[in-house]
Image (spheres, rainbow, N blue to C red):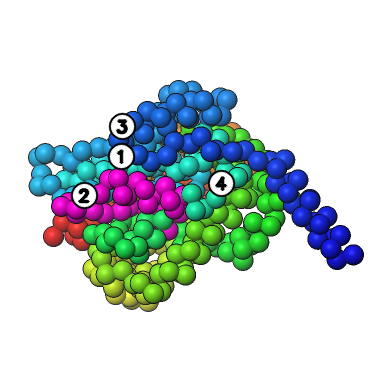
Amino acid sequence: MITVRLFALFFVLNFASSAYAHSDSTFPKPQEDFNQHIAEVRLHLIANQLNHRSEADAELNLPFERKASTAVPYRGKFLLIHGLNDSPFIWHDIANALTLRGFDVRAILLPGHGSTPEAQLSMGYKRWIKSSREHMRFYREQDKPFYIGGFSMGGVLATLLATEDEPIDGLLLFSPAYQSTKDHLLRWAGIYSKFRPWVFGGMIREDNPVKYNSIPINATSQYYKTARTLKWRWPRKPLNIPTLTIASANDSVVDVDYIIRSFNQGFTGEKKLIIYSNDSDHSPQDHVEYRASAFPNQRVLNQSHQSVLVAPQNSLYGKDGSVRVCNGNEWAIFSRCLFYTGTHWLGAQHTPSPDDVPVARTTYNPDFAGVMDAFDALFLR
């Protein structure tokens, strides 16, 4: 009887999995010729992207490379890795700032991203790790300093690469998702995804041209496995390299207390952690700086998971950007935010309105210049 039940369970799991499978096996592999890689990714995105996205939208999601300014001393190379459901577009402002400081920059696109959320229904975390590792191998040169930047899950991948055999010269991390606030649920996501493939019950409104709104449960499971891989390895190899980490205390995605513990214990070199917070009661800690998260003159109530690395001038996410982010809340809150024609408040997910005017997501950092000042103090000595 037990054997029959196990067989039945196995059949159900496999049937449910295959019913929602969407292979992204054709996603171009990293290669030494990065321009050729970009060309192949362009063709892949145009052929596989969401129906309402245009070729111009595909261009926004492409990996990219920029050369260091010749007006300043050359300082090395930065490989930039985006987060879950994201794309290289998130790095455009940081990339511009880095090139002005003498760094070559390359921002990669991870498999399963930039096209359709369905591509993550069958994605595996080992593929993200392998892809990041191969991009690093092709980009680094022995005679040039080499750094890695990571946002969210990309921060996990960046730190993971830094623990491997080939040494790197520093890390730049934004909202590194070392542990989620939903970790107690994510550990079961691999099983749950066999029965219910979407976090929100299916494909939802995809109105952001450079980021997925819909989240397959498998994607969250693969993120969890990526973070677990780092947790198993990192305690055995603390990193003695310059590290700048930026996060928001109001982040609804990652466990900020865990970021602080990981920062204090996992990095032993020159380091700085900046946390945006409106709480004035913080215990002093070495190498940790708290900055005001609210900017009332810009109607910013606090910083969000994404906003910390985006400049106010950004064409999509900036102060006058064209993309408004309302998703992640209950329908009543989401719909009021989406259809409100006045001037919104801006805040992290689940931030309450002070006066019943809807709160949209904060998508840029009014203190972007201050972030780069901290970068200069740590990396340009």
Name the spot of residue 318 as percent of width and height, x first: 38, 39
Q: Secondary structure at mark 2?
A: loop
Query: At 47% from the left edge and 70% from the top edge, which residue is drawn?
Result: 232
Query: At 21% from the left edge and 38% from the top edge, which residue is drawn?
Result: 67
Alpha carbon distance from label 1 to label 2: 12 Å
Left or right of 289? Residue 50 is: right
Mark 4 highlights which residue? 123
Query: What amino acid is found at the position of numbered circle 2 in the picture?
Result: Glu
Query: At 48% from the left edge and 30% from the top edge, which residue is drawn?
Result: 45
Left or right of 356? Residue 144 is: left
Name the spot of residue 202 as percent of width and height, x first: 68, 40
Q: Which mark is residue 141?
A: 2
Marks 1 and 2: CB-CB under 8 Å? no
Query: What amino acid is found at the position of numbered circle 1 in the picture?
Result: Glu
**Vertical placement of residue 280 versus 101, above or below:** below
**Which is nearer the N-term, disc 4 or disc 3?**
3
> Which quadrant of the figure contains the N terminus?
bottom right
Alpha carbon distance from label 2 to label 3: 17 Å
Query: What amino acid is found at the position of numbered circle 3 in the picture?
Result: Asn
| Residue 292 found in image quarter | bottom left
260, 367: nearer the viewer: 260
Residue range of the region highlighted in magenta in the rendering: 128-156
Name the spot of residue 84 as percent of width and height, x first: 49, 48
Marks 4 and 2: CB-CB under 8 Å? no
**Which is nearer the N-term, disc 4 or disc 2?**
4
Mark 1 highlights which residue? 32
Mark 3 highlights which residue? 35
Q: Secondary structure at mark 3?
A: helix
**Which is nearer the N-term, disc 2 or disc 3?**
3
